[in-house]
Image (tube, helix red, strand yellow):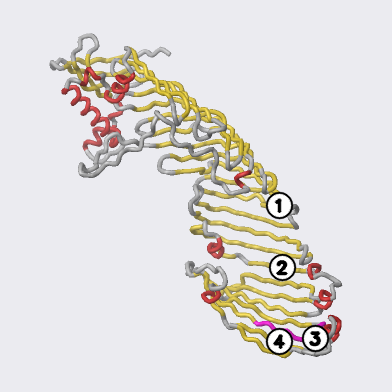
Amino acid sequence: MLKASGTLPAPLNLKSLDDVLQNDTLFEFKLASQPLSFERLRKFAPIPKTLKGVVEANLNFSGTPSEPQIEGTASLIDFHQSDQPKLPPIDLRTSFETENQQLILKGNAREPGVPLLDIKGDLAFLPAVWLKREKSPGDATINLVIKSTKLDLNRIKPFAPSIRSVSGELETNATISGTLAKPIYSGELTASINRMILLDSPIADFRDSRLRVTAKGKTITIEPSTFMAAGGTLNLGGKIELAGEEPVFDLSLKGKHVLLTRNADYTFRGHPDLNLRGPLSKATLSGTLAIAESLIYKDVEILPFGVPTTTDIPRPNLPTFSSRSKSKGSSLLVPAPYGNWPLNVTVTTADPILIRGNLAKGDLTADARILGTIGAPRPSGTIVTNKLVADLPFSDLEITSAVVTLQPNDYDNPIISLRGTSKVSQYTVQAFLSGPVQNPNLTLSSNPPLPESEIMLLIATGSPSAALEDREVASQKALQYLLEGLRRRYGNKDKSVLQRLLKNSDQIELSLGDANQFTGRKFSSATLEIDDQWDFTTQIDEQGQTRALVVFSIRFR
């Protein structure tokens, strides 16, 4: 791998360092490496497998002990990425030599026919002075300038595993001055991102974005930079001071319609206005977050239509109201020091959060504040529902009031207070839900009065137990339940004759096997909602008698 040759003086009468430095016998020593591929070097260094290239180096020592001369070259040939076949290989060549008590460095990086990077610099080289301890090597002055043309951002992808794909350009200019012990850095970096897709991030798709960072001394400045991501806009800026024992942040992040999180059941966007200020060990994250253009959409299939009867249907995982589930604790797994950063964030809703689905429609508004730390948040405030209607199999449950109160000491178990009213057949049902979300208390009442067990059966089947003792009534209720399930599943689609019939069926209220509260006679009915006040109803009883009604409703609040 390495080849060495040369001649070195070895006088026997040397008694001190001065004798060595005063020795004017010339010496020469050469060290050369064979071309070493990354495959061979990977045994000694953690080089990513996708990186390919060949390293060559030559080093020559000559002169006298008091005035040694150094000359050499170091090259990286055919450097490329195996997973980026469209990127041309790079050749990086550097040379260094001593001249007038300075070590001169020159270098460049090139693609075939295109210059990419130029390096020029010098370093004070005073070995005799250093050996006599007249000066420290750390006091040696340094001047280094690095300039680049526009680089393809794909070249940084192997060093950023969170990036799935990227297209754009990177331009850098850097200067190092001062001394080895106290270098002074300055320069700038500009990244123009046409498109970048990240792995495992809600804000995964960046387009037409620009980041500019400058450095001067021990201050890093993020110039006002704009990012377009997933339909939202982010603006980042601020400074990072490196003068003390730890970095000190003064950063701001503002955005509009920023995607916060998204999956098949919900989408949340917001307008963040956040600041990060303070040292690394205890920086504070503060500001506001206004939720906007957010949607919770969840369809629940009442009956498993389309599932073969021979298929095993797994038991549904339903929430329990009888006992509290195992607590997840009040802390998050966030590594230090970030988990210790204090929080002071106000969360509101710029637009109501819409709830849409086949079982419920309405919206939510929030007014909350999050204190504590990132690792142990302490939220307080309320979440209120507005115009929430739950579509039950045989009626609608109108939530007249619902408030969720966040608990600072138990953020995953807020307090809920809910009141709802439902009209089922000739019964008016009142539902009250209160207490911790993980162990609430449910109270049901009705008019005319029924026991709670009867009310639960009434809500589920549309009839009390006495009416269901009649097999014909029970069969009719099962048919109504089937039709309701078909309506929920296919009502908004248009692929078959049945689905077309069901498309607008949410305007029709079908009731089978009801009993007249005055005569006890069984009847079935269908009601068409014309508008908020006018309805058309047709009924047929067990004796085949029919009647039709036009109903005008006046509602009192």
The vertical placement of 306 against 466, above or below, is below
Q: Is residue 452 left or right of residue 144?
A: left
Q: Are marks 1 and 3 in contact (CB under 8 Å)?
A: no
**Within-10-Å neighbours for mark 2: few <14, some 14–19, many 20+:** some
The answer to which quarter of the image holds residue 431 is top left
**Distance (Cα) linking label 2 and label 3:** 31 Å
Q: Amino acid at mark 3?
A: Thr
Q: Are marks 1 and 2 in contact (CB under 8 Å)?
A: no
Residue closest to the eye, 525 or 6: 6
Residue under numbered circle 2: 145
**Within-10-Å neighbours for mark 4: few <14, some 14–19, many 20+:** some
Residue under numbered circle 4: 29
> Residue shown at 54%/38% (left/top)?
330
Residue under numbered circle 1: 246
The location of residue 64, given as percent across then percent down, is 80, 86
Q: Amino acid at mark 4?
A: Phe
Q: Are marks 2 and 4 in contact (CB under 8 Å)?
A: no
Q: Are marks 4 and 3 in contact (CB under 8 Å)?
A: no
The location of residue 359, given as percent across then percent down, is 35, 31
**Within-10-Å neighbours for mark 3: few <14, some 14–19, many 20+:** some
> Residue shown at 50%/51% (left/top)?
205
**Within-10-Å neighbours for mark 1: few <14, some 14–19, many 20+:** few
Q: Amino acid at mark 1?
A: Glu
Q: Is residue 163 left or right of residue 553?
A: right
Residue stretch in magenta:
58-66
> In which quadrant is the C terminus drawn?
top left
Element type at mark 3: loop
Residue under numbered circle 3: 64
Of the image marks 1 and 2, the number of the one nearer the N terminus? 2
Of the image marks 1 and 3, the number of the one nearer the N terminus? 3
